[in-house]
Structure formats: C-alpha cells, structure tokens
Amino acid sequence: MKEQHITIQEYANHFGLMWLSGDREAMKRPIYEPTVNRPGLELACFFDYPRSKRLVFLGNKETAFIKTMSEENINLAFDFLMNDKCPGIVVCNNLEVDERIIALARKKNFPLFVSNLRTNDLFIETTNFLTEELAPSVSLHGTLMEVFSVGVIITGSSGIGKSETALELIKKGHRLVCDDRVDIRLTRGKLIGKSPELLKNMMEVRGIGIIDISKMFGINTIRDYKNVDLIIELTPFSSEQEYERLGSKTQYKDILGVKVPLICVPVAGARSIGDIIEVAVTNFKLKRQGYDSTHEFEERLNELLKRNG
C-alpha cells in the first residue's frame, strides 16, 4: 500500500499560515506523519532521538529558550531540524521569529511559517487533520447510501441498476453519500466513505444523464460522509444459482484490513430492490443488537421436531 502524504503547501493553505521562507519547490515537501515535534531536546543540541519526518512546532517555551541560545547552538540545532525529511517549521501564537532562524531557513530554502493559533489548539487541529488526510485509503466502484442510519455500499456489475436502486431509496427518504465511486479512508479503526469532489451530490441515471440530487430532491437527501457498515452486492438472478435461504452464513469483504458484512441480492424484474435493501438493513441492525431471526427459526424448528419425535 502506497504511503499517504500531503504537501506542506496543502497544510499551510488549510490552516492559513503566514509564509516566511521556502520557494515553490520547497512547498512540495511531503508530510507523512500525523504527529508533530516540539523540539526541546534538539534545541538543547541533543540529537540522539531524531523525529526527522515530523512537522516542527515552536511555541512559547521553545521561543523563550531560543532567546537564550548562542548563535553557534542555534546553527547546530536548526541545521539538524531543517533536514531533507522535515516538512517544515511552524511558529505558533503569532510569536516573533528570531532573525537568525529566518536567515538560516532562507539559506537552506526551508519552509518556515507563523500561525496565530495557540500551540495546543494548533496541535490538536493538526493531529485531527493529518490523521484523516494521511489515513490509508482505497476507492470502490459503487454507491454509498445512508439507510436507516447504516452506511451501505451498493455494488454490482455495470448496468445492474445501482444508481436506479439508490434513486428509489432516496425517494423513500434515505440519503446519498456518493454515486459511482466511493473514496474510503481507514480512520481510527473505522471505514469512512465520501464522494470525490467532482462527483459530489451527482448521480448518473441511464437514459437521463447526470442529475444533481441536492437540487432535485433537497439538501437533506445527501450526506458528506458516512461510516461503511454493510455492502450489498446486486447480482443477476439465475434459476441455476443456489442462493442462501436461511441467512445463516455471513459473507465478508475485506476493505483496508476491516471485514465488512456482504449480502448478495439477486436482481429480477418483479423484485423491488429498494424494499429488499431496507429489509436487509433492518435485519442487519437486529443482528448487531443480538437478535438473529435465523437462530430463532432454527430453535422453533428444533422444538417442533422434539415435540413430534
């Protein structure tokens, strides 16, 4: 799996940082780690435990300590911090930056910024932002819906009726997250699905074309993102195919190391797939709460066999 990253330019734009140093090429430096480094030991010229890939924050304590440092130690410390792997340095609290640091950053063409946010606030916001942006991700072909508060990806071969089924569910009051392509990130152990920016709120209906769901059915019929809880795969109905009758066997699809329950629903002309998906989701929720209708049926059957045996 390819290691996720964003550029220091994207990070700076997101947080509205004030630029002090670094040209366009320097702004392409990648950020790979969702944590930051507050360099107490490095400022003391102790370099045995480098955190070279992390974004560096300088707050009140670091800035106060820098004022006590000699020019020789500043050069040693910041030559170490401003290495090829470090994405950049952010001075927080809108603090004044030592001119010696600015000069060294410009000499090394190193990204240096100032933020008006407090150090702890920027630390929390940065960790949350980078945790999401750098999370492992994958894209799936399908339609992601919120059905009875459950995140459901409707998959199947091209032309099977995924978008038409989603449209039926929207008219029933359920909400669309994205159609055609689902971008999924693994964040804090949960799979979060959202739409690519280009396809947001849009749906392709064969014979009609592209429609804007939010404009046609209202803003309350869409969601920006949703946890991926269940996958429903639409398959062409075949009289020769053996289908699950009791529902005792649970299938799963592995997405980024997480096993997501998978239900195969055969598509035929007389079947209302929207109704079937609502039933499947309701049954899924009951199972999560501990009630299994298959188990209930088997117990009734066993009890009947005992009475008649």
Image (cartoon, grey):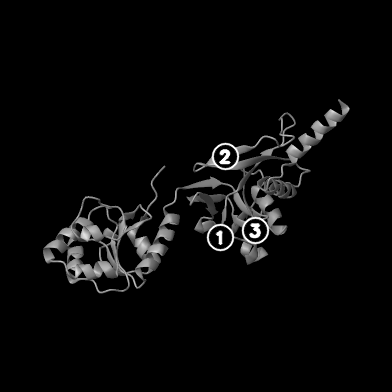
Q: Which residue is mark 1?
A: 224
Quick check: 155 left or right of 238? Answer: left
Residue 265's x, y, as percent? 69, 40
Mark closer to the chain start, 1 or 2: 1
| In the image, residue 116 above or below residue 130 | below
Q: Which tag, 1 or 3, sits closer to the chain's start? A: 3
Distance in Å between CA atoms under marks 1 and 2:
23 Å
Judging by the rendered image, the residue that carries numbered circle 3 is 175
Image coordinates of residue 111 in percent, x first then y, are 27, 62
Q: Nearer the viewer, residue 60 or 173?
A: 60
Say if mark 3 contacts mark 2, CB within 8 Å: no
Residue 253 marker: 2
Q: Are marks 1 and 3 in contact (CB under 8 Å)?
A: no
How packed mark 3 is, by other alpha carbons closer than 10 Å (few <14, some 14-19, many 20 or more), is many
Q: Residues within 10 Å of mark 2 (few under 14, many from 20)?
A: some
Q: Residue at x 55, y 50 (%)?
A: 181
Query: Image quarter for residue 201?
Result: bottom right
Q: Is residue 70 above or below residue 292?
A: below
Q: Could you give the CA–CA distance between mark 3 and mark 2, rounded to whole angstroms? A: 23 Å
Q: Is residue 60 left or right of residue 240?
A: left
Query: Dot 1 lies on which element?
Result: loop
